[in-house]
């Protein structure tokens, strides 16, 4: 029985995340994860948080705390 083949994504998850923020504006962390998860089913929540951290350190996004355990993610305009 042949193994299922996985295909490479043509767009990186970081690019898709930035595109979603540019299109829809500021979002909560969970809403953004759900929007990204539609295209990247194999992306876990830990990987998503690592992606947010990398983009925030790079100065592309800003995260702020809303309530306990909730964050707001916004695109930084240069």
Image: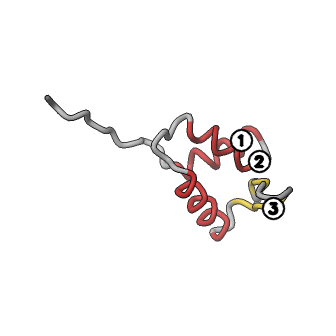
**3 or 1: tag closer to the N-terminus:** 1
Query: Is residue 54 found left or right of 43 in the rendered image?
Result: right
Q: Residue furthest bottom?
A: 57
Residue 28's tag is 2
Q: Which residue is mark 3?
A: 64
Q: Kindly indicate the quadrant of the structure image that contains residue 24.
A: top right
Camera-side residue of 40 and 1: 1
Q: Which residue is mark 1?
A: 31
Label 2: element kind: strand
- Mark 1 touching mark 2, by CB under 8 A? yes
Camera-side residue of 69 and 11: 69
How far, Cα to Cα, is label 3 from label 1?
15 Å
Query: Is residue 6 found left or right of 76 in the rendered image?
Result: left
Residue 15 location (% of width, % of height): 56, 49
- Quarter containing the C terminus: bottom right
Residue ID at (82%, 59%): 68
Residue ID at (68%, 44%): 32
Residue 70 location (% of width, % of height): 78, 54
How far, Cα to Cα, is label 2 from label 3?
10 Å
Query: Is residue 29 found left or right of 17 in the rendered image?
Result: right
- In the rendered view, tell whether residue 22 sits above or below residue 63: above
Residue 10 location (% of width, % of height): 42, 41
């Amino acid at each position: 029985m042949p193994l299922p083949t996985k295909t490479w994504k043509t767009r990186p998850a970081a690019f898709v995340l930035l595109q979603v923020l540019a299109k829809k504006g500021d979002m909560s962390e969970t809403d953004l994860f759900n929007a990204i998860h539609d295209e990247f089913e194999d992306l876990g929540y830990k990987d998503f948080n690592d992606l947010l951290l990398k983009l925030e350190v790079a100065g592309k996004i800003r995260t702020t705390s809303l309530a306990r355990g909730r964050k707001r993610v916004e695109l930084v305009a240069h």
